[in-house]
Image (tube, rainbow, N blue to C red):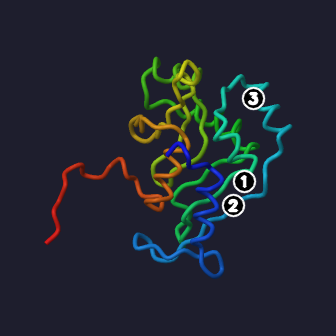
Amino acid sequence: MRGLSIQSMVEDLKSKLTEGSMLSSNLSGKCKCVFKEPGDAEALDMVIAETGWHIPEDFKHFLLMHNGADFFTNEYGPAFQIFSIEELRFNFELMVLTLTHVSLSAAEYLRNHCFPIGYLTDVGPIVMDYSKLGNQGSEHILILGAEIKDLNCDFKTWLDRMIRVQGDMYWEWNAETVLLD
């Protein structure tokens, strides 16, 4: 995984898109991915300066390549989306206002160490926990659904997995191995 870059992951996905930006999926029929235009480095620097967020290089690189994206969109909408630079702060404020289903200590932790980077359809915000960033640690991706789910991986690993499973919630799969006849 170390040798795989955000750019190569996205370019590989784009190369698999067929006519009309449609991708054939066993999970949801035909779907497409929509990548926004490159983000503005000055706007990203301003968000970082104003919020104090520690944004990992891989996520910065994604935003500067594609300022947000909708992944595996079918007639019902995208399986998941990654927010643009401009959407990050608004969605942080929205997250803070809607943290009524978690304990006060969890809400305080999320406000102080996390920010939403996207949305998983029918589940909730995709959140980056940057509290472990640095000191040879890495960010963690969290899913804020009915409960908080730590996926124990960084942005690049999470994005690679989500592309491989075409937006399916792989963390909910049954861990038992089932042998096929």
Instruction: Please name the residue shown 56% across and 65% down the image.
Output: 77
Q: Amino acid at mark 2?
A: Phe
Mark 2 or mark 1, which is nearer the start of the sequence?
2
- Quarter occupied by the C terminus: bottom left
Instruction: Please name the residue shown 66% across and 47% down the image.
Output: 83
Mark 3 or mark 2, which is nearer the start of the sequence?
2
Q: Are marks 2 and 3 in contact (CB under 8 Å)?
A: no
Q: Amino acid at mark 1?
A: His
The percent position of residue 120, horizontal first and vertical second, equals: 51, 51
Instruction: Please name the residue shown 56% across and 49% down the image.
Output: 4
Q: Amino acid at mark 3?
A: Ile
Identify the disc placed on residue 35: 2
**How dense is the environment of label 1, judged by Cα within 10 Å: few (below 14), some, or many (20 and up)?**
many
Q: What is the total number of numbered labels drawn onto the structure image? A: 3
Q: Are marks 1 and 2 in contact (CB under 8 Å)?
A: yes
**How dense is the environment of label 3, judged by Cα within 10 Å: few (below 14), some, or many (20 and up)?**
some
